């Protein structure tokens, strides 16, 4: 366990948090290629419905479900990173305590 690993995790946490905030603002840059494709298809389907004079309810619900799955993915990733950081910090504290208690005076 080293401080560089914790710093790396902190950087990843910051990146993932920025991605989550961007998705909540409606930006597409944090999306994977598959997610972008799904959103584009739903958007095109909605545009086609508008052109035909129909309701866009189906396309909107598809886009909402894609958005919620993206948010869930990023939240799970963020939770995993926080858990890993906590594990590393606990391990470092345990090593430090063992090192202190092993002194002979």
Image: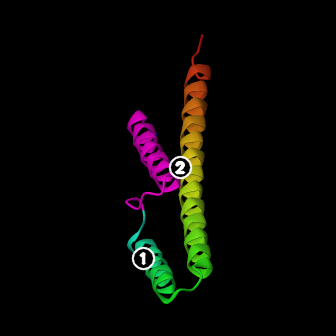
- Residue at 60% x, 47% y: name it: 83
Identify the element where label 1 is drawn.
helix
Name the quarter where the C terminus is drawn. Answer: top right
Q: Where is residue 9 in the image (x, y as percent from the top left)?
A: 45, 44
Q: Quick one: 16 or 39, which is closer to the camera?
A: 39
Assess disc 2: are there few (<14), some (14-19) or many (≥20) residues with their C-alpha within 10 Å of its C-alpha: some
Q: Number of callouts in the render? A: 2
In the displayed structure, does residue 56 sit left or right of residue 36?
right
Q: Position of residue 81 (x, y in %)?
A: 53, 49
Q: Is residue 105 above or below residue 31?
A: above
Give how far apart the Cα atoms at labels 2 and 1 are: 30 Å
Single out the mark in the foreground, 2 or 1: 1
Whether residue 53 is in magenta: the answer is no
The label number, if any, that marks residue 81 in the structure image: 2
The label number, if any, that marks residue 40 in the structure image: 1
Q: Position of residue 74 (x, y in %)?
A: 53, 57
In the displayed structure, does residue 99 sit left or right of residue 16?
right
- Residue at 49% x, 89% y: name it: 52
Q: Please state the extent of the stretch shown in magenta in the rendering.
A: 2-30
Residue with the most extreme top position: 105
Residue with the most extreme bottom position: 52
Identify the element where label 2 is drawn.
helix
């Amino acid at each position: 366990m080293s401080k560089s690993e914790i710093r790396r995790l902190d950087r990843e946490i910051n990146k993932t948090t920025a991605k989550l905030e961007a998705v909540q603002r409606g930006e597409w840059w944090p999306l994977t290629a598959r997610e972008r494709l799904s959103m584009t298809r739903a958007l095109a389907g909605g545009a086609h419905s508008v052109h035909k004079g129909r309701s866009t309810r189906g396309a909107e619900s598809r886009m909402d479900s894609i958005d919620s799955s993206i948010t869930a993915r990023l939240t799970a990733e963020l939770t995993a990173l926080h858990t890993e950081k906590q594990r590393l910090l606990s391990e470092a504290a345990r090593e430090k305590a063992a090192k202190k208690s092993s002194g002979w005076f």
